[in-house]
């Protein structure tokens, strides 16, 4: 089976940095487990990294969410916890994809190139469910016509009831929630 795991924006600033929240910290073991299984199964793994620059507050996103975060080159931009090891050593079947917006067209292109077409399954985990996770899931749901799109609910996090709302929207779009 051709399978990709996408770990969305599981970076220091979203876990214990400027936009950190407890629910994001609480999913660390679930994410590590999914990544460990993907490595063992030799699945393709994409780590997306929210990536901003010194002019962040002047951007459309910065005006919407005026909290400086994930500035390239800072500790907050790095992958969280044990995932930081993937930034030090290039692992086979693994890509780190920097993105400057909530969703990234480059994610779909990267997955398509890795499989020379469409994979069988694309799984998602990470943060923030109602912003970056949902944006990238919808892009893949639109781009890939036959791949099963799966979101690991227990390995995603958002603030308050936004988690529930995002999951319900994804269910309504035909995304498999596990």
Image (cartoon, grey):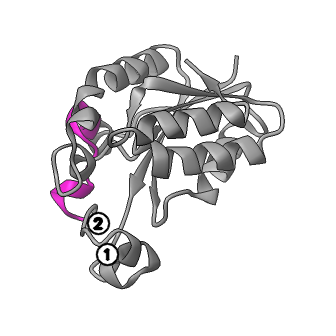
Q: Determine whether label 2 and label 1 are within 8 Å by CB.
A: yes
Q: Quadrant of residue 36?
A: top left
Give residue 175's position: percent from left, percent from top.
Answer: 67, 30
Which residue is identified by label 2? 72
From the viewer's perspective, tell me whether residue 38 is left or right of residue 9. right
Give residue 2's position: percent from left, percent from top.
Answer: 69, 23
77 w.r.t. 177: above or below = below
> Rounded to the nearest whole Å, what is the CA distance between mark 2 and mark 1?
6 Å
Quarter of the figure with the C terminus: top right
Query: Which stretch did the figure color magenta?
Result: 72-84
Residue placed at 33% from the left, 39% from the top?
Answer: 160
Give residue 12's position: percent from left, percent from top.
Answer: 22, 47
39 w.r.t. 144: above or below = above
Which residue is identified by label 1? 53
Category of crowding for the residue at label 1, using alpha-carbon neighbours closer than 10 angstroms: few (below 14), some (14–19), many (at least 20): some
Res. 85 in view: no
25 w.r.t. 137: above or below = above
* 78 part of magenta stretch: yes
Category of crowding for the residue at label 2, using alpha-carbon neighbours closer than 10 angstroms: few (below 14), some (14–19), many (at least 20): some
Residue placed at 27% from the left, 67% from the top?
Answer: 71
Which element type, helix, strand or loop, lies under badge 1?
loop
From the viewer's perspective, tell me whether residue 57 is left or right of residue 126. left
Which element type, helix, strand or loop, lies under badge 2?
loop
């Amino acid at each position: 089976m051709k399978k990709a795991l996408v770990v969305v924006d599981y970076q220091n600033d979203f876990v214990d940095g400027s936009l950190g929240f407890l629910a994001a910290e609480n999913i660390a073991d679930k994410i590590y487990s999914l990544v460990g299984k993907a490595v063992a199964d030799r699945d393709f793994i994409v780590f997306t990294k929210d990536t901003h620059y010194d002019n962040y507050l002047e951007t459309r996103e910065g005006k919407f969410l005026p909290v400086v975060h994930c500035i390239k080159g800072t500790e907050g931009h790095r992958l969280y916890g044990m995932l930081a090891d993937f930034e030090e050593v290039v692992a086979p079947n693994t890509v780190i994809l920097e993105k400057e917006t909530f969703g990234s067209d480059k994610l779909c292109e990267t997955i398509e190139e890795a499989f020379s077409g469409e994979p069988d399954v694309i799984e998602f985990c990470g943060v923030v469910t109602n912003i970056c996770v949902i944006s990238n899931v919808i892009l893949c749901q639109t781009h890939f016509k036959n791949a099963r799109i799966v979101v690991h609910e227990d390995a995603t996090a958002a603030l308050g009831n936004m988690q529930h709302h995002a999951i319900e929207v994804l269910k309504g779009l035909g995304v498999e929630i596990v």
